[in-house]
Image (cartoon, rainbow, N blue to C red):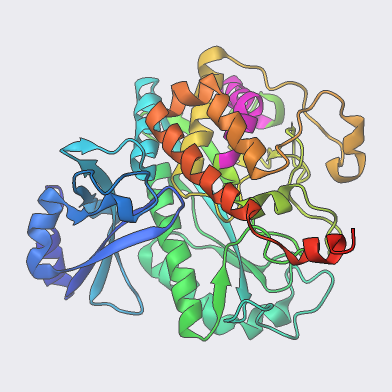
Amino acid sequence: MAKDLEKIAKDKGLKYFLISFVDLFGVLRSKLVPVRAIKGMQKDGAGFAGFAAWLDLTPADADMFAVPDPDSLIILPWRREVGWLASDLYIDGKELAASPRVALKQQLKKAAKMGYTFKTGVEGEFHLIKEDGSGIYDDRDIQDKPCYDQSALMRRYDVISEICDAMVEFGWGAYQNDHEDANGQWEMNWEYDHVLKTCDRHVFFKYMVKQIAENHGIRATFMPKPFSNLTGNGCHINASLWDKTGKKNLFMDAKGELGLSQLAYHFLGGVIKNVDALTSFFNPTVNSYKRINAPRTVSGATWAPNTITWGGNNRTNMVRIPEGNRIEFRLADGAMNPYLAPAALLACGLRGVKDKIDPGKRCDLDMYSEGHKVKDAKKLPMNLLDALRLTDKSKFVRDAMGDELIDAYVKLRTTEWDQHCHHISQWERDNTLDC
């Protein structure tokens, strides 16, 4: 064992560990384990009934074991006797292929065989709302363009600073926090890193934001489009390939267009060509499609893509090149599974590198006002069902991600779509009672 969790617990005064995993719906599942039992859990894992989580298992399946990764340990700042751990899932001694963290690690193995390390940073947006979900928490946050509003920011200083202080303590490299484009919306940033580390941190970040907000009598939501008239919650992924040592950024080329290497453009080509078939991973809920296919908001722009285009420092494209060291993938939203979305992005990029795919001509238009001028760009799916059908039928997706994962994911998300279709909305009553 690289790290002895029992010894770490004694050194740091821990009493319990949360052994956690994320299911296919992005729900964080855990067991609270006393220190006296952690030695066995570190070796064999904590046992779960897989059917009780969204993993497409049955009551007849054998016990599922979550084996914790000691390198992921985070001590809860608001309850310092508890340590949180990310885990990998096993059944009968074999990794569970249809589990998010394992799926990401499978893509990382493919990247490693090609000589690459994958690094990412995420921009997690969220709203602070009233506990009953009826509206934003701050009744004074009413500007049409509230982005970067200092007064609104400082009215929530207690919550935002507590979250940021924790990230600083963790050593994540927290560097900025701001009020975002929608009323009641926030974004908090920390430094990029190896994708697995970033994903573990992202999982904990979402939990931490919700818990600290709750401690202050506020509800936090990462829902993609919680309010129809306001900008939705994206989760932009900044991505780059590095050499196998993780020390050299292979996307950088001072002589390349926009400072990017040919490798970077092939990676981008794979994203442009295949992203529609994996939109269901980046935009996984019924609500997601009200963000990427939304009309103009009160601020004047949705800041979300609706067409598969790329360009330079232009936020109206699905992929932006802000500077010559990475791509910024702007499609993913706040509901994305922190492991599955980067895994899908990497799968697209690696196929592009392998097949040397050309991303096509860059787009320098304002896609919100001039998008009709782009005739050869594909549109994103209009709803979750269309996205799931593309995922299900794609040979590329099945080759890249595996049938076991895709079958489980499509089945569970289609069930969610069916449940949505059975629901009668107020809009339907308002518009069709007298038809």
Say which quadrant the C terminus sits in.
bottom right
Q: Quadrant of residue 128?
A: bottom right
32 left or right of 206 in image: left
Extreme residue toward the top, this view: 355
Q: Please tell me which residue is depicted at 40% across the width and 61% down the height of the picture.
A: 204
Query: Toward the viewer: 189 or 217?
Result: 217
**First to last magenta residue range:** 259-280
Q: Residue at x 84, y 53 (%)?
A: 295
| Residue 379 lies in the magenta-colored region | no
Residue 282 relative to residue 320: left or right: left
Q: Position of residue 188 (x, y in %)?
A: 56, 64
Name the dominant secondary structure of the magenta segment.
helix
Residue at screen point 54% across, 43% down = 414
How many numbered discs sit on the rendered protein?
0
Q: Report x, y in % for residue 144.
A: 84, 71
In the depicted structure, whether residue 141 falls above or below residue 248: below
Residue closer to the observer: 284 or 435: 435
Residue 279 is inside the magenta segment: yes
Residue 396 horizontal/vertical position (percent):
52, 21
Considering depth in this image, is 365 or 90 the residue closer to the camera?
90
Task: Name the residue located 43 percent from the left edge and 43 percent from the top edge.
Answer: 195
Q: Is residue 207 visible?
A: yes
Residue 146: x percent and y percent? 78, 71
Task: Look at the picture and state if 312 lies above or below 265.
Answer: below
- From the viewer's side, name the closer residue of 38 and 432: 432
Q: Quadrant of residue 208?
A: bottom left
Q: Is residue 229 visible?
A: no
In the rendered image, the vertical position of residue 359 relative to residue 373, given as above or below: above
